[in-house]
Image: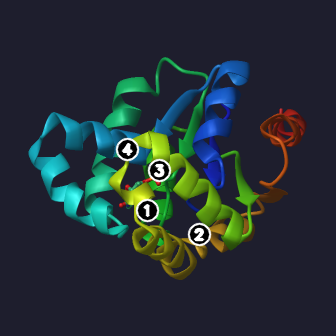
């Protein structure tokens, strides 16, 4: 099994790259942002609860996202080659919960791949995406800046968690989409 954490700030290209990697390696793409947006548009109680955090660019409580990941693993773990986690884990308790949930199934994280992009470039990309994504959190510059500071304050530390386990790899997330995909693939191919 190949279980990857695609890591990086909002706008670093995790979703774009994950979509390419799942095809090549036949993995299941698990994006907590996508799962939460689906709950939100279906108007479920979970979606309604998450909405206020998402619209403000704050993190949804750990228990909510960990519960969603648990459901996803229960549904898919026996039938896939592995997972790409995108936008999860975003806190140390989430990273610890992920390890525990995987261990229950005799699985573990193979590698964390972190995409590094300058703050100016992140803001530019997110504002640009906001023109077409229909995401409230991509259109307001204040919310975008808050998402980046939440990342710096609460999420960046998760990279050290994987570094301590000898599972961290940092790559530039700037350049053409294809060149970044190639760099990710060359790292992944060395893991096999
Ligand atoms: P994303 O699509 O990954 O940028 O996520 C959009 C929003 O969903 C974030 O700004 C958070 O409000 C929420 N979210 C997504 N993933 C998580 C997570 N792992 N932990 C907490 N909140 C999350």
Q: Which residue is mark 2?
A: 158
Q: Which residue is mark 3?
A: 130
Q: Which residue is mark 1?
A: 94
Q: Are marks 1 and 3 in contact (CB under 8 Å)?
A: no
Quarter, ligand 1: bottom left
List x then y, in percent, for residue 16: 63, 37
Asked if one can make out residue 74 in the rendered structure from this viewpoint, the answer is yes
- Which part of the image, by quadrant, shows the N terminus? top right
Q: CA distance from mark 2 to mark 1?
A: 9 Å
Q: Quadrant of residue 159?
A: bottom right
Q: Earlier in the sequence, mark 2 or mark 3?
A: 3
- The local secondary structure at tag 2 comes to helix
The tag on residue 68 is: none
Residue at 15% across / 57% down in the picture? 49
Question: Alpha-carbon neighbours of circle 2 within 10 Å: few (<14), some, or many (≥20)?
Answer: many
Which is more toward the observer, 173 or 184? Answer: 173
Q: Earlier in the sequence, mark 2 or mark 1?
A: 1
């Amino acid at each position: 099994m190949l279980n990857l954490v695609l890591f990086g700030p909002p706008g670093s290209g995790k979703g774009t790259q994950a979509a390419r990697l799942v095809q090549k390696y036949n993995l299941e793409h698990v994006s907590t942002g996508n799962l939460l947006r689906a709950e939100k548009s279906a108007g479920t109680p979970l979606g309604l609860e998450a909405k206020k955090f998402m619209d403000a660019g704050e993190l949804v409580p750990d228990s909510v996202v960990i519960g969603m990941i648990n459901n996803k693993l229960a549904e898919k773990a026996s039938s896939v080659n592995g997972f790409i986690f995108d936008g999860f884990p975003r806190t140390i308790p989430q990273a610890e919960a992920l390890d525990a949930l995987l261990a229950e199934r005799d699985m573990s994280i193979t590698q964390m791949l972190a995409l590094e992009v300058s703050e100016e470039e992140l803001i530019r990309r997110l504002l640009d995406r906001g023109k077409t994504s229909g995401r409230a959190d991509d259109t307001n510059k204040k919310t975008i800046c808050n998402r980046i500071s939440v990342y710096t304050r609460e999420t960046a530390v998760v990279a050290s968690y994987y570094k301590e386990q000898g599972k961290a790899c940092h790559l530039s997330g700037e350049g053409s989409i294809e060149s970044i995909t190639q760099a990710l693939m060359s790292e992944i191919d060395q893991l096999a």
